Every structure is written in structure tokens, then in C-alpha cells.
Image: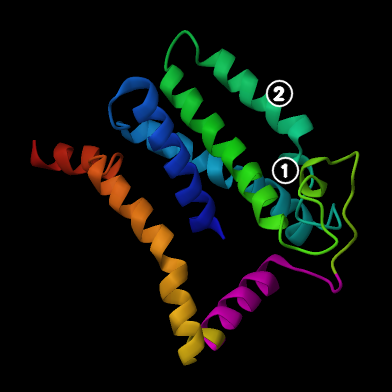
Amino acid sequence: MPWGHAAFGYLLYSLGHRLVTRESPNGPLVVLALLFGTQLPDLVDKTLSWGLHLFPQGYSVAHSVLVAVPVGLLVLGATASGRRDIGIAFTVGYWSHLLGDAILAVPKRGVSPSDRLLWPVVTLPPYQSEVTLIGRVNRVISAFFGEVLTTEQLVFLALYSIPYLLVFALWLVDGAPGVAHFLRADDS
């Protein structure tokens, strides 16, 4: 889910930034670059698959390490002389998305974590049924709300929410980078 990629990317970036600089992340452009990087693979590949039907799966071009590594290095190189922090944030976000997808594939039977990351060397089989962007979003939303109403699912949702709440707390400890900048601008 988009929020999972955003939270995982922010966690890695914030902890890495603190480790290197001993400061919390700062700046709205850095946070936007990080957020954009965490969503880019799905924005590209899900659109190409679900929307345009150019690929049989939502894991292709932008999820491939054969594309992501050169793109990340290109962005790092392009921002090296100016806003290096923006390039690092974008690249951490982008690469964390791939790492997150690989980690999520580990417990699945018959799926190698690298399968999603090696396009065009590995091409995943088509979905079992025709997938459209609107249909997929409707299915996810209806499944989510349909299952959340049971007691067991509410307990699961509470446990599922804990990592997100911890990342949210980290974001607050970091000074709410991105949002805090805009709030300070309104006070001026």
C-alpha cells in the first residue's frame, strides 16, 4: 500500500540521516522527493499494467533494479553539486520501495523476492483476471472495509497500525519535516 512504502522509506531515510548528520531530516523539498521516490515504482508500473495494459503485472520497468539503480545514481549525480539532500531522499525513497516489495515477497510460497525486481530478465505471469486501475482500487477498498468490521480484523488492524504509529511518532520527533515548514511560513 502507498502508506506502507511512504512509512518504510521515511523510517530508513530519517534513521540514516540521523546516523550520518546527527540531525533530524528537514525541508519540504526533501520530504516531497522522498515521498515521490517511495511511490514512483507503483505510479509507473501499475499505470502501465492496470491502466494501459502494456504489461501483464504491476511489477515491471520501474520495479526493476536494472532501471532503479541507474536512475538513482543519475539523480544522485545530477544533484551532487546543488541539492544533494533532495537526490539522496529521492533515491532512498525509490530504492526502499523495491526493498519493501522484496521483503513482502519473502513469506509467499512460490515467489522469489527477486522476481519482482528483475524485469525484463524475469517477467511475472499475468494476473488471474483482467485488472483495471479503477477495479483494483475498488477491490482493495471494499476488501479492506469488508474485513475490518470483524473483531479479529480489528485486532489485526490495531497490530498492523503499530509500525505506522511509530513512524508517525518519529516524524513528529523529527519536527514534522515538510508540514512544519509550511506552518512556519503561515505564521510569518
Relative to 77, 16 lies left or right: left
Q: Is residue 129 magenta?
A: yes
Asked which secondary structure carries label 1, the reply is helix
Residue 29 to residue 53: above or below? above
Cα–Cα span, label 1 and label 2:
12 Å
Q: Amino acid at mark 2?
A: Pro
Residue 62 to residue 144: above or below? above
Name the residue located 34 percent from the left edge and 29 percent from the top edge: 18
| Mark 2 burial class by Cα count in 10 Å: few <14, some 14-19, many 20+ | few
Relative to 109, 153 lies left or right: left
Front position in the image: 155 or 8: 155
Relative to 21, 45 lies left or right: right
The boundaries of the magenta stretch are: 128-146
Mark 1 in CB contact with mark 2 (< 8 angstroms): no
Q: Amino acid at mark 1?
A: His
Q: Position of residue 76 (x, y in %)?
A: 56, 19
Disc on res. 115:
none
Q: Position of residue 147 (x, y in %)?
A: 55, 86
Name the residue located 38 percent from the left edge and 27 percent from the top edge: 19
Q: Dot 2 corresponds to which residue? A: 70
Q: Looking at the image, which residue sits at the far bottom?
A: 150
Front position in the image: 136 or 84: 84
Give the quadrant of the C terminus. top left
Relative to 99, 171 lies left or right: left
Give the quadrant of the N terminus. bottom right
Disc on res. 63:
1
Dot placed on the residue nearer the N-terminal end, 1 or 2: 1
